[in-house]
Image (spheres, coloured by chain):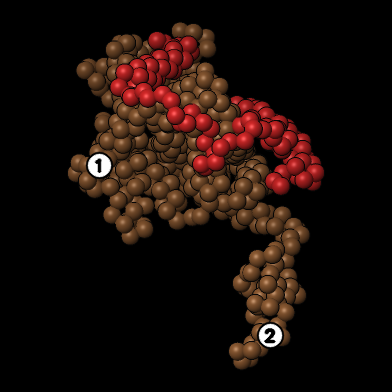
Chain colours: A brown, B red
Amino acid sequence: MSVFASPDVPGFGSDLPIPWWLLLVKAVAIFVFLVVMTLFAIWWERRVVARMQHRIGPNRVGPFGLLQSLADGVKLALKEDIIPKAADKVVFVLAPIISVTPAFMAFAVIPFGPEVSIFGHRTALQLTDLPVAVLYVLAVASVGIYGIVLAGWSSGSTYPLLGGLRSSAQMISYEVAMGLSFVGVFIYAGSMSTSQIVAAQTQYWYAILLAPSFVIYVVSMVGETNRAPFDLPEAEGELVGGFHTEYSSLKFALFFLAEYINMVTVSALATTLFLGGWHAPFGVTSFWAGANHGWWPIIWFVLKVLIALFVFIWLRGTLPRLRYDQFMRLGWKVLIPSSLGWLLLVATVRAVNAQYNLQSRDVLLYGGAGIVVILLLTFIPDLLATRPSEEPEGEPEWDAMAGGHPVPPMPGQSRPVLTGARASDDDDDLPTEDDT
Amino acid sequence: MDGFYGGYGLVGLLLLVGVLFVTVAFVANGLLRPTVPGGDKTVTYECGVDPVGEGWAQNHIRYYVFAYLYVVFAVDAIYLFPWATVFAAPGFGAATLVEMFVFIGFLAVGLLYAWKKGVLSWV
């Protein structure tokens, strides 16, 4: 056994000779899971958003239209591939590959369930676990950003360039907040390994114990995946399609795949770090003792991931897109400072806890107080900010020919009262035939 | 596949499967898709208008400021992670906590400075 082997990660050390074919089966199973989840998530998103907008959604291909996204994917792969003349060809082709491969890789450390028996081999439902598993997920997620910024740059077009830059600025900003929200979990779990973090959540989920961390994570995971209301890189009204405007055929499909896999990955990470991983929800174990054993935990895991995905879809169906300055302000002036403050509070509570052996109830109490304090603190910048008053006191008088065009009165402005058919003759503001 | 490097070997295995997946997809795509070159289809897309000039434009420095800030805070996070895992272990007492307070204090001052300088407000 290597000296670097982590002794606190059971089931992944040298004591467990897992045959190579089993590892390959697990690796392929992760791939199949991710692709199926992507196809399902696209269908689900379309159906749920349709429901929210009083439409029906896809219902032609397969039962309930379930095969619609598969049909779309196949169709997309059979389309002609166009590389624009202005593009940097090598980077243009490489970008979607750089985007999609790390998206697959992040799932290597996500635990689907406890140890099970597969053809007589005891093995955990997880491809591998590293002592720094969560850091690894952050690292490969960052590699995916290269794919996006390179796609934007190599297209040789204005919209993708702006979209790619926006996207990278957005993702790096929210990755900081995301990384800081993990620290509270590490403090309580005492480990960065995903299986250890899940094991530490047998009693309390960290979503409850570390509620502010969870809130910060949820906000930053939406920002990190470029999803509504933070889908500024793809703001259709401003940037056409953002970084993938010039992409077509399979390359576009790969970007699409990467986006949805990233959604599944951050949802799985939320499940693992904050929602108890593959543990059954509260109360289930009281009447079903076997809920946390064998293959059953996969159900809880997938269920939690699907709920997290539903939140993504719900947000998209509900909220309008943020402006870019509002978005950056939220990231750097609210999420990151409150994250730092919260983790100092967690560390202090934990230290005091270890020193004086306080009960968990007290910790929760401190946590609740902390939420209130941090929420209040985030209002301070808003209070101090000198912003132009929303409604100027003296409403400028209505100029019917402002800018050289006839314009209607703005809200708050009133049209001069006209009396009689010939009254407009005396009114200089209104364009009449005499003016022309 | 054991020990410290075994874990990373498995990550490499997943990378290999990923590259294989992309390769197969590209080969299949290359064989199945139609290729009809010519026409204006390779012209840069500008909402129907002929593009003027190059697509590569000069960009505002503000993007780079955020990149620098990111580096600062990413290093901060990397420094925090191992600290967070050993923090509660016996032998690491109040001194460990105070050290981290000092470190984050410095970072916070830096963030406040950037804030005061107006770097954080997007124009």
Nearer to the camera, B10 or A13: B10
SS state under label 1: loop
The reply, left or right, for residue A410 in relation to residue A262 is right
First-in-chain label (1 vs 2): 1
Q: Position of residue A156 (x, y in %)?
A: 58, 29
Q: Name the residue located 43 percent from the left edge and 25 percent from the top edge.
A: B38
Nearer to the camera, A95 or B49: B49
Question: Does residue A132 sit above or below A52 in this rendering?
Answer: above
User: Disc 1 vs disc 2: which is toward the camera?
Assistant: 2
Q: Position of residue A247 (x, y in %)?
A: 46, 31
Q: Name the residue located 22 percent from the left edge and 42 percent from the top edge.
A: A61
For the C terminus of chain A, which image quadrant? bottom right
Q: Which residue is mark 2?
A: A425
The reply, left or right, for residue A363 in relation to residue A77 is right
Q: Are marks 1 and 2 on the same chain?
A: yes
Q: Name the residue located 29 percent from the left edge and 31 percent from the top edge.
A: A74
Amino acid type of the residue tagged 1 in the rendering: Leu
In the picture, residue B16 is in which quadrant?
A: top left
The reply, left or right, for residue A153 in relation to residue A249 is right
The chain containing the residue under callout 1 comes to A
Nearer to the camera, B10 or A171: A171
In the picture, residue B3 is in which quadrant?
A: top left
SS state under label 2: helix
Q: Name the residue located 29 percent from the left edge and 15 percent from the top edge.
A: A22
Q: Which residue is mark 1?
A: A66
